[in-house]
Structure formats: structure tokens, C-alpha cells
Image: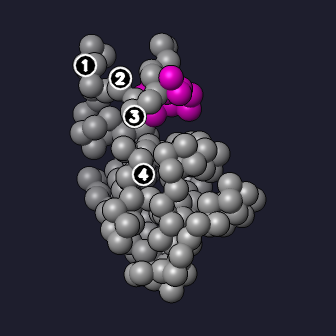
């Protein structure tokens, strides 16, 4: 099921009015936190959601050349969608963070962009790495509690690593 169908399944477009910034008003619709959690968990379990305003993911490429190729691919995807993400590179690591500036939160565009980036990464055998708050190259100390926190309304599952599927559950 595509993301557009997912939005319709949750009936997220019923209260949408004419778009203020974009032609397609569904692109501006900001779902509530529970709806965002459901969509993220179903379609983008490896992405981290920050304050229900951004989603981000760290990819680890096999070498610098592949990292550059990935950035070019992300730029092409973004141009085709007319929706852009914050992309940073550190040698073989590529970090992607997306949000919709127009609405200061997450919209269907962010999820569609993330799915397309994940598809490219999978097709090109690019791995992902849970983000650790400092761009991934420097692992957090095991006793550093800041890296064990979950988003508001969720709690950490003992024994699970940050970013691992099922590491945070609803309180």
C-alpha cells in the first residue's frame, strides 16, 4: 500500500482545505502525533522522528564515491518532487533530515521522499545506521543517558538499542 493510500486509510484528508502554499492541499495537511506515529512505524520503522516535526536517517555507504552518488540521487528525487531535505555527508555517512517548511511539521511529502530515498539505498546496497545524536561516527558512551531517551509519550524498552525497531513503546 502506498503512502497516499495510507493517508486515505487513516482518513487524514477529510478536514483538508484549499492549499495555501501548494497546489495539492494534502501536501500541507499536518496529521496529529498518533497518526504520524502510525505511518512512521508502518512505512519507515528505521527512520527517527524528532518531536513529530522531522524525520531523519543515517546511511553508511561503502565508500566516499557511493556517498556522493547517493547525494546526487537524493537531489534528483528532491527536484522531481519539488520537496527538499537537509542532507549532510561525512566521508561515507549520509544523513537525511526532512520536514515541510511551509507547515513547520511533517506532511505526506516527507514520507514520500523518505520512502524513495530508502528505495534507492536498498537498490544500491547502502546500509543504514541508527543516529546517535552526534552524526553517528562517534558512538555514545553506554552510560550516557541522553541517548536512551525516546520522543514524548514513549518510553525506552530495556535491552534495545536506540533506533532499533521496538526500542521505544507508547507509555
Coordinates of residue 2 in the picture (x, y in percent): 70, 63
Who is closer to the viewer here, 78 or 138? 78
Classed neighbour count for the residue bearing mark 1: other residues with Cα under 10 Å, few (<14), some (14–19), many (≥20): few
Residue under label 1, please give it.
Answer: 144
- Residue that label 4 marks: 55
User: How far apart in space, not on screen, are marks 4 and 2 (Cα)?
Assistant: 18 Å
Q: Does the residue at mark 2 contact the one at mark 1 (Cβ under 8 Å)? A: yes
**C-alpha separation, residue under disc 2 versus residue under disc 3:** 10 Å
For marks 3 and 1, the one nearer the N-term is 1
For the question of whether residue 10 can be seen, the reply is yes
Q: Between 130 and 41, which is closer to the camera in this rendering?
A: 41
| Nearer-N-terminus badge (4/3) | 4
Cα distance, mark 4 to mark 3? 12 Å
Task: Identify the colour scheme used.
Answer: one colour
- Separation (CA) of disc 3 from disc 1: 17 Å
Q: What stretch is highlighted in magenta?
A: 160-171
Q: In this view, does 93 lie to the left or right of 46?
A: left
Pick out the residue farthest to the bottom.
23
Number of the label disc, if any, that sits on residue 151: 3
Amino acid at each position: 500500500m502506498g503512502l497516499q493510500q495510507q493517508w486515505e486509510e487513516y482518513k487524514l484528508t477529510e478536514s483538508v482545505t484549499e492549499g495555501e502554499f501548494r497546489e495539492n492541499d494534502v501536501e500541507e495537511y499536518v496529521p496529529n502525533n498518533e497518526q504520524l506515529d502510525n505511518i512512521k512505524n508502518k512505512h519507515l520503522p528505521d527512520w527517527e522522528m524528532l518531536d513529530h516535526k522531522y524525520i531523519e536517517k543515517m546511511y553508511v555507504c561503502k565508500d566516499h564515491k557511493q556517498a556522493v552518488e547517493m547525494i546526487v540521487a537524493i537531489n534528483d528525487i528532491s527536484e522531481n518532487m519539488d520537496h527538499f531535505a537537509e542532507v549532510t555527508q561525512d566521508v561515507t555517512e549520509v544523513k537525511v533530515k526532512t520536514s515541510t517548511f511551509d507547515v513547520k511539521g511533517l506532511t505526506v511529502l516527507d514520507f514520500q521522499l523518505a520512502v524513495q530515498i530508502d528505495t534507492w539505498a536498498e537498490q544500491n546496497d547502502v546500509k543504514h545506521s541508527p543516529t546517535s545524536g552526534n552524526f553517528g561516527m562517534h558512538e555514545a558512551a553506554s552510560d550516557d543517558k541522553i541517548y536512551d531517551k525516546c520522543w514524548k509519550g514513549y518510553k525506552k524498552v530495556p535491552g534495545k538499542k536506540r533506533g532499533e525497531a521496538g526500542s521505544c513503546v507508547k507509555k
